[in-house]
Amino acid sequence: MLAPANTCCTALQSPALAQPAPHATRKQSLLARLLTALALHRQRQHLARLDDAMLKDIGLTREAAQHEAQRPIWDAPGHWLR
């Protein structure tokens, strides 16, 4: 049996739950940013070493893979910087 509409769970309405967790808004440490940049660099280098058949499997051309591999280390996608 369903609960009446006016008896909704108060825990879901708590103002504390509406705020992001403290770690979610904290900026990355310098070490974390460096490790992220190095991981990005490694992934780009691995991408550049894929053969044409593998690139075709993931929907990339040789030119696109080379272009991505040549991007500077600080040129990271926005979702990597959060």
Image: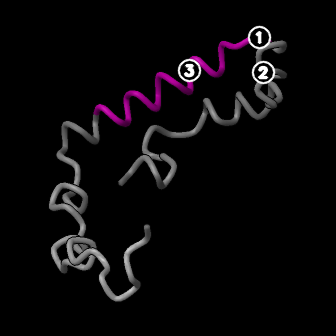
Q: Which residue is mark 2?
A: 55
Q: Earlier in the sequence, mark 1 or mark 3?
A: 3
Q: Are marks 2 and 1 in contact (CB under 8 Å)?
A: yes
The kind of residue tagged 3 is Gln
Taking depth in this image into account, of 8 and 67 the one nearest to the observer is 8
Residue 55 in which image quadrant: top right
Q: Is residue 58 above or below residue 80?
A: above
Using the image, tell me which numbered label, if any, was put on residue 45.
Answer: 3
Q: Is residue 38 above or below residue 2?
A: above
Q: Secondary structure at mark 3?
A: helix
Taking depth in this image into account, of 47 and 3 the one nearest to the observer is 3
The kind of residue tagged 1 is Asp
Residue 12 in which image quadrant: bottom left
Residue drawn at x 38%, y 36% as measured from the top left: 37
Q: Is residue 77 above or below residue 18?
A: above
Q: Earlier in the sequence, mark 3 or mark 2?
A: 3
Q: By what rule are the colours in the image chosen?
A: one colour
Q: Is residue 37 above or below residue 77?
A: above
Q: Which residue is mark 1?
A: 51
